[in-house]
Amino acid sequence: MTQIELRGVQKWFGAVQVIKDLNLTIADNEFIVLLGQSGCGKTTTLRAIAGLETIDEGDILIDGKKVQHLKCSDRDIAMVFQSFSLYPHMTVYENIAFPLRATRMAKADIDKAVREVAQVLRITDLLDRRPSALSGGDMQRVAIGRALVRRPKAMLMDEPIGALDAKLREEMRAEIKRLHVKQGSTTIYVTHDQIEAMSLADRIVIMHEGVLQQVGTPEEVYQRPTNLFVAQFVGSPVMNVADTTIRETGGEVAVAVGGTERGFPFPRELLSKLNGHAASDGIALGVRPEGVLVRLEPADGFLPVEAQLIEPLGSFDIVDLKVGKEVLRARTKSGFISGTGEKVFARIDPAQAHFFDKASGRSLGVSL
Amino acid sequence: MATAVMTTLDPKSRAASRGMSDLAIRNLFIIPTILFLIVFNIFPLAYSLGYSFTDFRASTNAPANFVGLQNYRDLLNDPYIWNNFAVTAKYVIISVVGQVVVGFGTAMLLNRDIPFKGLITTLLLLPMMLSMAVVGLFWKLLYDPSWGVINWALGLGKFEWLGDPRMALYAVAITDIWMWAPFVMLLSLAGLSAVPKHLYEAAAIDRAGPFYTFFRITLPLVAPILMIAIIFRTMEAFKTFDLAYVLSTQPSTEVIAIRLYKMAFQEWQTGRSCALAYIVLIMVLAITNIYVKYLNKVKER
């Protein structure tokens, strides 16, 4: 039962503010992922929670108790480092036993706990080896084992699988998820990989330049990004963002992209939902590639466009469509468009369109 | 295999343009060194081994007579020689332990962010760079019972550092510690700064206290390089001559090297001193081997 709360946390490195007024509540047993580019303050936040970094202002609470002045050893938190940080001169067994031995636990209890954890992580046959004789994935398992063996109040993970190769990363991702489901402990996980974040998190916390951008479940963050940064950071391929003008002609609402004469047809409610923003020029349209519908034949509401570039990705293709001066990327079945330069027809699915205030980057909260 | 190590000469290099082959260059570098080693190391070593079986005296023209193992037998049955060895052993232990404690301690103090770290380190290294004889001479002045700075600073009155037979060996060892602790410090500092910082972070997260962290993380990881420092210092301390010779004339400080010197160049027992030199050599080799075995064990992980 562990709840972690950050209240108005601020942190400077010299003149640079790396965490700006961060407020966050993490529920018991929750898997939270801190997501952001490198240098956004996510690792610093994690280290501050662990006690490896001091904070300049605000409170960090674990189970309602302020801990920002406690040493890391008094916070009862385990951490898995990106570099694994295994003790090179100890065997796997000694590595996992280290946190228990450090607190002078009885020998028999240590042995039992270590073997239990080793079994869960399937590393029992590696217990006598030294870290230098392990593969990257096994080193990571040992590092996780060392964190798990204490049954800490919370697990902190700093890009724990960032150093592994792509295939292993996918395997370990699934394993971490399996472990969390099985063992269940409050976990804070730092990564810059949005796929990792989406697949693991109960809730994702997106940070940018020390500022918290959005907190939400993977679906919320993906489907209702609060601003342009989140919209473009989450999701692969990246969301299309284009300057847009919204016109009303003869009862029809059209959203024009890239200065084209004809716009994509949208339902009338758009105008009322935009609340007067339609008149101004400062609106950006955001639409994910799967929200750009493509047909080979002309159809109602579809505009003729030219396919500029096709990236076949196996299960689907990503096609660059030239719309006026802009390029919209669409997702099609693989092999749907036979070649570049082909004329096809496209429209935007109003239900998947997002509108942002260009000046502030904030979402206008329109959902049709 | 040996040829695989050699890389081919760059055909555009200056040496190649002078028509030198790889082999010629290799010989150019290696042969002078080998010749030097043979003339100045290997030949005297073998020659003195021969003398150690004779009653040769370099001070007379009398021909050397072969006496077999008599020299070795005499030396190993001589209680005075054994006393010299006991003095040497005591000296080695005091001096090396002292150097490791002081040197490693200083390294621990320096292994953090402090202002003027580079300057402080350099200043601390100065004793090591001085000449042994000079160090001996001015420590003799420092130790002087009537006007020495040490007695004055510690308020010890007319304490006899070098005059007291029981104290003299400690006094020599203290001087040796002063001089060579920086060497242990330098190597320890290199070892300490090579311990990754994230291991300390991991240990802190794992709730290890400062002592536990020191004995379970710091010390084992610095051990190999510390071991090298200890090997060097033990060998040197075993062979100590100048410092003890300059500082004190007490029988209680007559380490084996001084005995050897007196035997060879004051008593002119050349054959017997060669035998003693061989006994010392074998002992140093044996001690070093024990350390090297341990070092290899430490390095395995």
Image (tube, coloured by chain):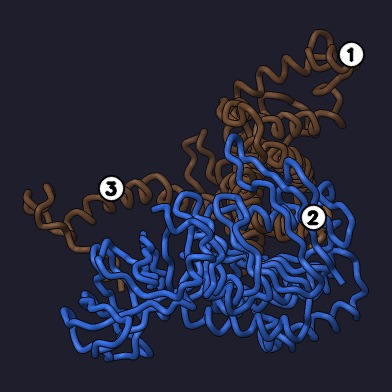
Chain colours: A blue, B brown
Q: Position of residue B232 (x, y in %)?
A: 60, 47
Where is the C terminus of chain B found, in terms of image quarters? bottom right
Name the residue rendered at 55%, 50% in the picture: A209
* Depth check, front residue: A141 or B263: A141
Q: Chain of mark 2?
A: A
Disc nearest the viewer among 2 and 1: 2
Name the residue rendered at 39%, 70% in the picture: A253
Q: Which mark is residue B158?
A: 1
In the orientation shown, which residue stands out farthest toward the top? B147
Q: Which residue is mark 3?
A: B32
Q: How many C-alpha atoms fall within 10 Å of the one at disc 3: few (<14), some, or many (≥20)?
A: few
Q: Chain of mark 3?
A: B
Q: Secondary structure at mark 2?
A: helix
Q: How many C-alpha atoms fall within 10 Å of the one at disc 2: few (<14), some, or many (≥20)?
A: many
Q: Position of residue B214 (x, y in %)?
A: 77, 53
Residue B227 seen in render: no
Q: Chain of mark 1?
A: B
Q: Secondary structure at mark 3?
A: helix
* Depth check, front residue: B157 or A154: A154
Where is the N terminus of chain B found, in terms of image quarters? bottom left
Q: Amino acid at mark 1?
A: Lys
Q: Amino acid at mark 2?
A: Cys
In the displayed structure image, the side of residue A270 where residue A184 appears, left or right:
right
Name the residue rendered at 74%, 38% in the picture: B102
Q: Quadrant of residue A83?
A: bottom right
Report how far apart the C-alphas of labels 3 and 2 lie in the structure: 61 Å
Above or below — where is A253 with respect to A206? below
Above or below — where is B266 with respect to B283? above
Q: Which mark is residue B138?
A: none
Q: Quadrant of residue B187?
A: top right
